Amino acid sequence: MKKLTTSAIEAAQPGDTIRDDQVSGLQVRAGAKRKTFYLYFRTRAGREQRPKIGHYGDITIEQARRIARSWLADNAEGKSPVVRTGPEKPTVADLHAKWQELHKPRLKPETQRGQESQWNAHIIPKLGRRVAASLTDDDVASLHDSISRHSPVMANRVHALLTTAFKMAEQRPLRWIQPGSNPCRGIRRNKERPRTRYVDDTEFLTAFEAVPEPVQDFLAIALLTGARQGDLRHLQRTDLTPAGIVIVEGKTTLTTGKTRIVAWSEALRFFVRRSLERQAVVAEKGADK
């Protein structure tokens, strides 16, 4: 019996069948145009099954073996091993569309924009047309390395995004790749150093004096509260309490449910009052039109 090797598959003629000596039931059948991996097994009820795993060239022998082992393990537990929804050969671009449908709505708007930019700038141009199940860790490592040359931190962000997307592809209802075959595993992330450079008082005052009053108020309130830009943009009048300003920290509230109150100081009260008075004037002018 021929061993299931690359050279044996490439030499196979239409009508030939090559059976694997490592995974029981795994075989390649040569057709007129393509050579295809199949898995032969019997269910617990004794029913014969010969599901197609994929075409040689779209997936490698090792990937076919991983998928076959996973299907056999599912069958041994009484589960149906062939579960897939969506296109016959979903691509990375198809995975992007499913990410938009299933995962993106759970993210904050700022995170949505950032991750969409990563898809469009880095992932889709390089991998968008590739069949998702054919991607290997070498493909992901190559993408990570190419981004790392000019932006090591961005390379880590793109890798994290792809990891999440392929975890989704492993799970039901998709099952576009088999559990345990995520190609993002084992990629070494770049080291990230925390920022140690801070704006000093002179630099802050120079910038403060150069910007218009609305921006001055925003800068001052950010400095006095220590709040992130996104958190300040979402402040409501109801967050201004007698005890201070209630800051809802968007990056942590979803996981901890905590908020904090920044007590009033004379400076904080001045800039908040000036901002509110300006908003009232703008609103009054708008009502007069």
Image (cartoon, rainbow, N blue to C red):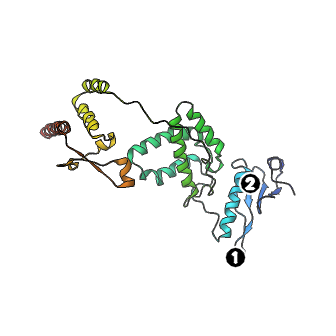
Tell me if residue 51 comes above or below residue 281 in the rendering: below
The image shows residue 164 at horizontal and vertical percentages of: 52, 50
Helix, strand or loop status at disc 1: loop
Three-letter amino acid code at disc 1? Ala
Q: Secondary structure at mark 2?
A: strand
Q: Nearer the viewer, residue 12 or 42?
A: 42
Amino acid type shown at disc 2: Thr
Image point (23%, 49%), residue name: 239
Q: Quadrant of the N terminus?
A: bottom right
Label number found at residue 29: none
> What residue is rendered at 82% in x and 46% in y?
7
Is 119 displayed left or right of 65 in the figure? left
Q: Nearer the viewer, residue 70 or 204?
A: 204
Q: Whole-percent x and y of residue 176? A: 60, 55
Q: Position of residue 94 (x, y in %)?
A: 55, 49
Give me the C-alpha separation between circle 2 and circle 1: 26 Å
Q: Which label number is shown at residue 45?
A: 1
Image location (x, y in percent) of residue 195? 43, 34
Front residue (pair 139, 196):
196
* Other-residue count near label 2 (Cα within 10 Å), few / some / many at <14 / 14–19 / ≥20: many
Against 45, is 274 above or below? above
Label 1 packing within 10 angstroms: few (<14), some (14-19), many (20+): few
Quadrant in the rendering for residue 124: top right
In screen coordinates, is 205 left or right of 94?
Answer: left
- Residue 36 image label: 2
Residue mark closest to the camera, 2 vs 1: 1
